[in-house]
Image (cartoon, rainbow, N blue to C red):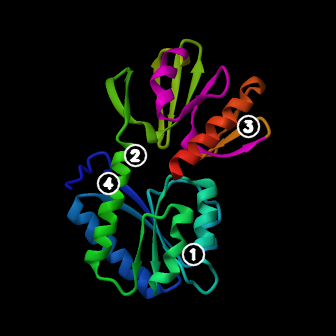
């Protein structure tokens, strides 16, 4: 399958491996893959699972996780990641196939057995791109002061109503445009968005925690959930996470 990578000009990849040599090999492989696919890869490497989890936010497209590390159980690490990020593609790295047998528990895409050649990693990354493209190809067309602009729904964190204008908060900025939440709600609802109160429509994939009457977003904002909408909000969030992991 030829994957159109135009919607992924930048791919965010996290690598967790306690072997410094293997981290360098993976980094070289990833640089080669990015060059071959004409992708800009933002690669972050971690020497153990805790280093990844410290301040973790769901900003990665793909995680390469070593299963057997001296201080970290890779499966436990994946479970912790899934509590915050149900969407990230996980590929396990292991020294023996049997160690990856429970990968289905965390919806892992696949696994690689050390030592593996570049072609094996490239194959798994190609499969990951196919998953990402199918899942995230949806977009919405917004009209701001500069004209029409197509924005991938995965990049929208939440929408905020301000008078007769909307602030569309993205992972890397914001767009201001005329309109109302009422107008945008039908367009966004099929893509996992929920109107949490009279001022906000939130992208459920960017909700990393719910604290009493607030939703905590992946970019750090804390947004109020109205009391009458709280029960329905929690139901929608549960269904979103369950559907993502199916």
Q: CA distance from mark 2 to mark 1?
A: 25 Å
- State the residue position of label 3: 214
Which disc number belongs to residue 130? 4
Q: Which numbered tag is attached to residue 62?
A: none
**Residue 59 on the magenta segment:** no
Q: Are marks 2 and 1 in contact (CB under 8 Å)?
A: no
- Cα–Cα span, label 2 and label 3: 27 Å
Q: Earlier in the sequence, mark 2 or mark 4?
A: 4
Residue drawn at x 31%, y 45% as measured from the top left: 7
Measured in 3D between alpha carbons, the distance from the residue under mark 4 to the one under mark 3, in whole angstroms, is 34 Å
User: Does residue 199 lie above or below 20 as drawn?
Assistant: above
* Residue 147 in the image, given as x and y percentages of width and height: 31, 22
| Callout 1 secondary element | helix
Q: Eyeballing the image, is 53 above or below 27?
A: above
Q: Quadrant of the rendered structure where residue 198 is? A: top right
Q: CA distance from mark 1 to mark 3?
A: 31 Å
Q: Earlier in the sequence, mark 2 or mark 3?
A: 2
Front of the two marks 2 and 3: 2
| Residue designated by label 1 | 74
Residue contact between numbered discs 4 and 1, judged by CB atoms under 8 Å: no
């Amino acid at each position: 399958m030829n994957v159109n990578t135009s919607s992924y000009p930048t791919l965010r990849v996290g690598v967790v491996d306690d072997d410094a040599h293997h981290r360098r090999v993976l980094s070289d492989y990833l640089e080669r893959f990015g060059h071959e696919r004409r992708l800009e890869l933002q690669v972050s490497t971690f020497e153990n699972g805790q280093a990844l989890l410290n301040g973790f936010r769901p900003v990665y497209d793909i995680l390469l996780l070593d299963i057997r590390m001296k201080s970290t159980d890779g499966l436990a690490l994946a479970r912790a990641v899934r509590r915050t990020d149900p969407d990230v593609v996980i590929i396990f790295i292991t020294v023996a196939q049997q160690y990856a047998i429970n990968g289905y528990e965390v919806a892992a895409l696949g696994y690689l057995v050390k030592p593996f050649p570049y072609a094996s990693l490239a194959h798994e990354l190609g499969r990951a791109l196919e998953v990402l493209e199918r899942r995230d190809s949806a977009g919405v067309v917004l009209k701001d002061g500069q004209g029409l602009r197509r924005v991938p729904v995965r990049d929208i964190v939440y929408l905020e109503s301000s008078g007769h204008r909307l602030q569309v908060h993205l992972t890397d900025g914001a767009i201001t445009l005329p309109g109302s939440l009422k107008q945008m709600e039908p367009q966004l609802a099929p893509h996992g968005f929920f109107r949490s109160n009279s001022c906000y429509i939130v992208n459920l994939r960017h909700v990393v925690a719910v604290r009493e009457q607030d939703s905590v977003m992946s970019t750090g904002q804390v947004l109020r959930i109205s009391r009458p909408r709280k029960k329905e909000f929690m139901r929608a969030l549960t269904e979103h996470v369950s559907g993502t992991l199916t």
